[in-house]
Amino acid sequence: MRRPVQRIVKSSQVMEGAGVHLHRAIGFEAPERHDPFLLLDDFRSDLPDDYRRGFPWHPHRGMETITYVLRGEVEHGDSLGNRGVIGPGDVQWMSAGSGIIHQEMPKGEASGAMYGFQLWANLPAAHKMTAPRYRGISARDIPEVTDHGGAIVKVIAGTVAGVTGPVRDVVTRPEYLDVTIPRGASFTHATPRGHTVFAYVFEGQGRFDAASRAPVGNRSLVELGDGTFVTVAAADGEPVRFLLVFGEPIGEPIAWRGPIVMNTQEELETAFAELEKNTFVKTKGAP
């Protein structure tokens, strides 16, 4: 059964961090709507003033951040001593677990371009207080495949045409694909029933439903209903590029304030009290 389009939403401009201008596609509504995903930010810009102030030191607990850079770089560091740079085509899949304090500072190309996305995913209660860890994935380690319909897919997590991406051990069993469909081509991909599935278009235009539906263009979130596969076609004689993401809903209560995501208000209050007392970080040294 083909997954139908439930809703198409344009991302909205917001300001975060120390003054970073970005577009948010997920994160305005009840967090259960896209369970297990909480937030999707599009930080593409050609203007350094939009991003250079970055995201100085801030805490995380109980969730994961997935940063995917297309152009420019993001320098990061944390309270456990980890340091690094996420460059073009790289992914950082960070599980905050019991808590870290970190910073992310974007640095654009010489032209000023800084393009990328950050997705937040929830962790189940049983994993919220586990030790933090990173999966730093370089562009060269992300396989690119061409499926039988002509689509070109970078497989970050999940499997396409028998090729599995480098992120394989996440409890919500996510798939994270960067899909380019050339003009005149299409892409069909199996999805487990009951999983949350969405696409985020960032280049060109595509059709995600019956041919009568208007094509979907840049900075548009496509929420898909239940089914066993997704079919997308390039529209109006031009290619389309989008992120296709899905994962298994957790189905637990969500208590969320800023960068901390727990199950109850009491757990949230405990986390913020620990920040005040400087007992927030539970793991010493790099995980």
Image (cartoon, rainbow, N blue to C red):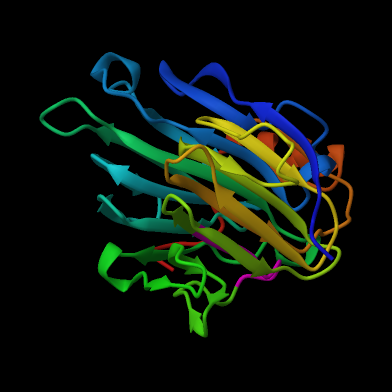
Q: Is residue 194 visible?
A: yes
Most common SS among magenta residues: loop
Front residue (pair 120, 282): 120
Q: Residue furthest bottom?
A: 162
Residue 30 sits above or below residue 61 on the image:
above
Q: Is residue 60 visible?
A: no
Tell me where residue 36 appears, x and y as whole percent. 74, 53
Residue 248 sits above or below residue 256 on the image:
below
Front residue (pair 241, 266): 241
Residue visible at 50% across and 72% down?
Answer: 167
Magenta span covers which residues? 170-177
Residue visible at 46% across and 56% down?
Answer: 178
Residue visible at 39% across and 40% down?
Answer: 116
- Point out the image quarter for the C terminus: bottom left
Tell me where residue 189 appears, x and y as whole percent. 64, 68
Front residue (pair 126, 165): 165
Q: Which quarter of the picture shows residue 244?
A: bottom right
Q: Is residue 79 magenta?
A: no
